[in-house]
């Protein structure tokens, strides 16, 4: 169930609740691993190639929901699994999720979707705190059968690396400067050059190996441009909002554990209007007046600001299937991390709304709430007595033997809603 949060500070996180299948370990000897062949499996190998369900030459399909775990080979203790993606072509709503452990109960390492198609190459590795050294991968493709096949999928090298040491990336300075320093933006005009300087922090340097002087530095400028080095310059050619990422990879393929998410606003060019001027000749003196946003109706030149649009990145969390009629309580949550450090929502009017796309066969057995880091909690939908009449959300398939997803509808909670709560409506 995708959930969309919108505020005037342009936050758009997303999470999806879908089917989750548990993995059953078994050792596969093949060096080519297709997602449909290896779901519910554990691959113990440090060599080979990992493909989508279509293999090296085909596309993956709609309505896929697969899970696979990669671990180091049995004869290579002290190693961690690594997947290096050389090709990636995902369609809208299709998601690869990587977990730092042998099951989907582990911490999410990375979520890859259509917007990651330009990030090639990239690698995903188990972290040092992950004693199993395994990575679990889930893939879901959209549920609506629009076309008989989906994207081209992916090609990833299966490998192993030494257990990773911690790397953190830091934006040291920028020109123009970030304003305010802790939570702000870099504001520029179209064609204006930005200079960025970063560094790596290596708190475990020398613990297992030396990597502070052997690491490589990469910048993702948010407009499809990628550059390398600790200091880079860039010029944006289109107005809008962009997220800058600064990543570090050491000599064994371990990557920095944090995201800097530096925001850049590129101002649109203002709209100029010039009125007709009286005829004049060489040597004449004329007076030309200007104004902003038509404040002076007699001015000859008027400049009007053009509103820009900022499209932030979105996130998806792990998945959970919620079956009906089992007599068991299920709970899941998603952490919204798009806000900058120290940023607060102090006025309810700044919250545009919280929307969810969901299908569920019994509204009254759901409870939905939002919770702030300081513990403040607001209830969006309160659990009720099941003795009352059934209420559908969306168009579910209300047959216990049929676990296929139905059709979700969009529902929104807003500060000034006129329909009351779900129950009241």
Image: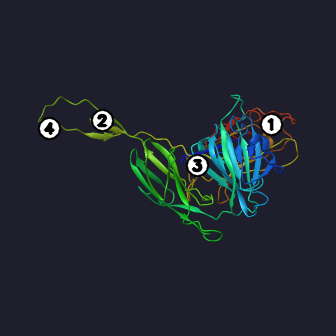
Q: How busy is the neighbourhood of tag 3: few (under 14 within 10 Å), some, or many (20 plus)? A: few
Q: Which residue is mark 1?
A: 361
User: Residue at (75%, 38%) from the top-left corner?
Assistant: 64
The first of marks 3 and 4 along the sequence is 4
**SS state under label 3:** helix
The first of marks 3 and 2 along the sequence is 2
Q: Quadrant of residue 306?
A: top left
Q: Which residue is mark 3?
A: 348
The first of marks 2 and 4 along the sequence is 4
Confirm or deny contact between disc 3 and disc 4 (CB under 8 A): no
Q: Is residue 300 left or right of residue 325?
A: left
Does 151 sit above or below residue 202? above
Q: Is residue 107 left or right of residue 183?
A: right
Residue 47 x/y as whole percent: 72, 52
Q: Point out which mark residue 297 bears.
A: 2
Name the mark nearer the viewer: 2 or 4: 4
The first of marks 1 and 2 along the sequence is 2
Q: CA distance from mark 1 to mark 2?
A: 60 Å
| Total number of numbered discs in the rendering | 4
Q: CA distance from mark 3 to mark 2?
A: 37 Å
Residue 193 x/y as whole percent: 39, 50
The first of marks 4 and 1 along the sequence is 4
């Amino acid at each position: 169930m995708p959930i969309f949060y919108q505020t005037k500070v342009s936050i758009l996180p997303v999470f999806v609740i879908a089917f989750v299948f548990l993995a059953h370990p078994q050792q596969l000897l093949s060096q080519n691993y297709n997602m449909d062949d290896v779901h519910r499996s554990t691959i113990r190998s440090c060599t080979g190639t990992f493909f989508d369900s279509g293999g090296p030459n085909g596309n993956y399909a709609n309505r896929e929901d697969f899970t696979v775990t990669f671990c180091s080979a049995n004869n290579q203790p002290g190693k961690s699994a690594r997947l290096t993606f050389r090709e990636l072509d995902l369609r809208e709503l299709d998601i690869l999720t990587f977990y730092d452990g042998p099951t989907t109960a582990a911490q999410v390492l990375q979520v890859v979707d259509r917007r990651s198609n330009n990030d090639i190459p990239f690698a995903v590795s188990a972290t040092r705190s992950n004693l199993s050294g395994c990575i679990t991968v889930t893939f879901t493709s959209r549920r609506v059968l629009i076309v008989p096949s989906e994207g081209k999928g992916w090609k990833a090298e299966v490998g192993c690396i030494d257990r990773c040491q911690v790397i953190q990336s830091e934006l040291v300075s920028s020109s123009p400067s970030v304003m305010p320093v802790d939570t702000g933006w870099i504001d520029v005009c179209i064609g204006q050059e930005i200079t960025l300087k970063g560094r790596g922090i290596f708190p475990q340097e020398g613990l297992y190996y030396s990597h502070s002087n052997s690491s490589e530095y990469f910048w993702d400028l948010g407009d499809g441009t990628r550059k390398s080095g600790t200091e880079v310059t860039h010029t944006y050619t289109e107005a809008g909002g962009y997220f800058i990422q600064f990543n570090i990879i050491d000599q064994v393929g371990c990557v920095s554990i944090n995201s800097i998410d530096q925001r850049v606003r590129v101002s649109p060019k203002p709209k100029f209007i010039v009125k007709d001027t009286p005829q004049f000749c060489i040597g004449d003196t004329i007076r030309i007046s200007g104004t902003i946003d038509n404040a002076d109706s007699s001015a000859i030149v008027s400049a009007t600001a053009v509103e820009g649009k900022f499209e932030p990145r979105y996130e998806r969390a792990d998945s959970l299937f919620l079956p009906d009629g089992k007599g068991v309580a299920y709970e899941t949550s998603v952490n919204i991390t798009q806000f900058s450090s120290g940023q607060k929502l102090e006025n309810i009017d700044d919250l545009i709304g919280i929307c969810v796309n969901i299908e569920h066969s019994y509204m009254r057995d759901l409870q939905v709430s939002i919770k702030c880091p300081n513990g403040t909690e607001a209830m969006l939908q309160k659990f009720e007595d099941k003795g009352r009449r059934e209420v559908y959300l969306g168009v579910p398939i209300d047959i216990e033997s049929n676990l296929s997803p139905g059709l979700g509808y969009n529902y929104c909670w807003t500060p000034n809603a006129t329909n009351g709560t779900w129950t009241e409506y």
